[in-house]
Image: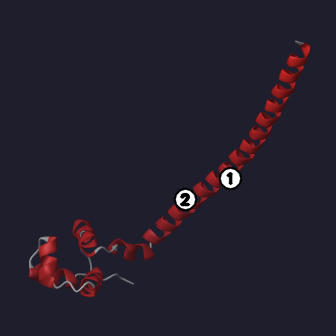
Amino acid sequence: MAIHIGKHIRFQADLRKIGATELGKLLNKSRETVYDIFDRESVDTELLLACCKVLNHDFFEYYYSQEPLLAFREKEINDWKERVDALNNQLEREKKLNVVQEELIANQRENIKHLEQRLKKNK
């Protein structure tokens, strides 16, 4: 199913109550060009990015729901999940190591305390 990006741009402009003249000023385009954009099935990425900024909407998102970008995005998401899982595992290991180190420090402090007491007795 092809994306008619112009319809999405028009819909978002209408939602924000931005007419073709005002949108044209925001995009530095004529009113006629804006109507032409509304009729286009595709627009170049620079213009689409400008529409994203002006209308505060991610128009690129529509393309991520279709192949091949859908597969790319799913792979990227899975890669990030694996990285997050690995970092969470590392964090858990570090927390356990920290607990062991804190116990070791507490034991060393206790040993120092006993040694200091013995030294005082021997003086």
The label on residue 11 is: none
Query: Image check: 30 left or right of 61?
Result: left
Q: Can you name the residue that lies furthest to the top here?
A: 123
**Is disc 1 surrounded by few (<14), some (14 to 19) or many (20+) residues within 10 Å?**
few
Query: Which label sits in the foreground, 1 or 2?
Result: 1
Determine the residue positioned at 91% across, 14% down: 122
Query: In this orientation, which residue lies closer to the viewer: 77 or 53?
Result: 53
**Is disc 2 surrounded by few (<14), some (14 to 19) or many (20+) residues within 10 Å?**
few
Quarter of the image where the N terminus is located: bottom left
The label on residue 89 is: 1
Q: Amino acid at mark 2?
A: Trp
Task: Tell me where residue 102 appears, x and y as whole percent.
Answer: 75, 40
> Alpha carbon of mark 1 to alpha carbon of mark 2: how far?
14 Å
Q: Secondary structure at mark 2?
A: helix
Determine the residue positioned at 28% across, 86% down: 15
Query: Image check: 30 left or right of 122?
Result: left
Residue bearing the label numbered 2:
80
Task: Tell me where residue 51 appears, x and y as whole percent.
Answer: 24, 73
Q: Are marks 1 and 2 in contact (CB under 8 Å)?
A: no
- Residue 66 visible, this angle: no
Q: Amino acid at mark 1?
A: Asn
Determine the residue positioned at 14% across, 80% down: 22
